[in-house]
Image (cartoon, grey):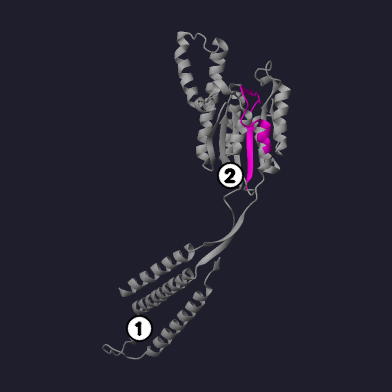
């Protein structure tokens, strides 16, 4: 503990000592001298009595306690006025890192997306100062969560997304594969089918806009939207990362506004690192229409162009292992900002002052009686 204004204590104690010495000498000069009252003779016997001696000891002790208490309270007040403090180094609460989760929400990826969002809830809960956002896309893109450090809100949105992927799974496996699109639905399953459709329409109103003539899984546009969700792209002091999950099965009916190759070049230009997560071959959707190796290599090249790392979700490499490895990458490291600040420590002198003042006043009240 240090004092910000040490001179207050030095000057205050000097004045206090001088005052106590002055009072002591005045009291000593007056001692034994008659000042006022009625004179009495032959008081020796009274002074020798046990009661007198006990009362005198009590008076001396209480006086000493009162003077000590008042002196202690004054000294404590001086220390309080001198502003005790300590100096400490504090790590800035703002880490200069922005992370955007970019998810291809087409039905071919509901299992991988569900697993990823479930694990990321724990990752987000452990963040401190980083900003996190979520962008989802299919035909069109939706900024589902803008960059924020409100982690409770992000986790709530991840919960909702995970629920959406479970709805996709139920619809695809229980209805689409069994009855086809627009096929006859039995009466006992019709009510649940309508309920599922209504809930899915809520999400897909944004991600399947103009799907009938633009197509689906517009990968480049999805990545481009996530990229331009970062504010002030020219700010090089912020570490920026996109974690993208897609199978790269482009199903565009026309030319994309921005294709995957162009989007990755813009990421590189703006110093945004892309990390890619790709499904395993056994989970790859419609291999008869899309070549697995071609889709994989196209996405991998785009990722590695930005300096990021490409991952394939397999039985031996879980989503948790992938995300943990992403967090270890050099691109994720953050400059630690250290600041030195002073913290006031008034508690100890304040409590001592209160205790000493209470003791001194109590002793004075007893003396009055």
Does residue 347 sit above or below 190 in this rendering?
Answer: below
Q: Quadrant of residue 65?
A: bottom left
Q: Is residue 324 left or right of residue 121?
A: right
Occupied quadrant, residue 249: top right
Q: Earlier in the sequence, mark 2 or mark 1?
A: 1
Residue situated in front as seen by the camera: 221 or 16: 221
From the viewer's perspective, is residue 215 above or below residue 333? above
Residue 326 shows up from this direction: no
Is 46 located above or below residue 312 in the figure? below
Mark nearer the viewer, 2 or 1: 2
Label disc, if present, on residue 47 of the rendered structure: 1
Res 306 quadrant in image: top right
Where is residue 111 shown, x and y percent of the image?
60, 24
Q: Which residues are magenta?
A: 238-265
Residue 296 visible somewhere in the drawing: yes
Q: Which residue is mark 2?
A: 130
Rendered-image quadrant of the C terminus: bottom left
Mark 2 Cα within 10 Å, few/some/many (few <14, many 20+)? many
Q: Tell me the SS state at disc 2.
A: loop
Q: Position of residue 246 (x, y in %)?
A: 64, 28
Secondary element type, mark 1 = helix
> Do the residues bearing badges 2 and 1 touch, measured as CB atoms within 8 Å?
no
- Check if residue 253 falls in the magenta segment: yes
């Amino acid at each position: 503990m240090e004092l910000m204004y040490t001179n207050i204590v030095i000057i205050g104690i000097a004045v206090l000592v001088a005052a106590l010495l002055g009072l002591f000498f005045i009291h000593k000069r007056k001692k034994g001298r008659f000042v006022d009252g009625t004179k009495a003779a032959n008081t020796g016997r009274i002074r020798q009595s046990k009661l007198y001696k006990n009362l005198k000891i009590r008076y001396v002790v209480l006086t000493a306690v009162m003077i000590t208490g008042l002196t202690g309270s004054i000294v404590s007040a001086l220390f309080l006025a001198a502003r005790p403090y300590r100096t400490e180094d504090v790590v800035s609460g703002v880490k200069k890192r922005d992370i955007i989760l970019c998810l291809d929400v087409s039905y071919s990826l509901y299992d991988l997306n569900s697993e990823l969002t479930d694990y990321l809830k724990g990752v987000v809960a452990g963040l401190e100062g980083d900003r996190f956002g979520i962008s989802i896309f299919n035909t069109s893109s939706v900024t589902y969560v803008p960059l924020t450090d409100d982690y409770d809100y992000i986790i709530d949105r991840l919960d909702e997304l995970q629920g959406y992927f479970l709805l996709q799974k139920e619809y695809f496996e229980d209805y689409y594969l069994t009855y086809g699109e627009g096929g006859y639905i039995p009466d006992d399953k019709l009510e649940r089918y309508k309920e599922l459709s209504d809930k899915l329409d809520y999400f897909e109103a944004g991600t399947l806009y103009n799907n009938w003539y633009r197509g689906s899984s517009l990968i480049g546009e999805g990545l481009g939207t996530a990229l331009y969700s970062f504010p002030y792209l020219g700010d090089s002091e912020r570490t920026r990362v996109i974690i993208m999950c897609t199978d790269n099965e482009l199903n565009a009916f026309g030319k994309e506004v921005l294709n995957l190759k162009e989007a990755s070049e813009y990421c590189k230009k703006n110093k945004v690192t892309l990390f890619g997560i790709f499904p395993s071959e056994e989970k790859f959707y419609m291999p008869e229409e899309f070549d697995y190796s071609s889709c994989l290599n196209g996405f991998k090249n785009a990722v590695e162009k930005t300096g990021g790392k490409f991952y394939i979700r397999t039985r031996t490499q879980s989503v948790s292992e992938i995300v943990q490895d992403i967090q270890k990458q050099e691109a994720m490291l953050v400059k630690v900002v250290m600041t030195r600040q002073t913290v006031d420590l008034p508690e100890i002198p304040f409590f001592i002052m209160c205790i000493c003042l209470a003791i001194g006043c109590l002793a004075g009240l007893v003396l009055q009686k």
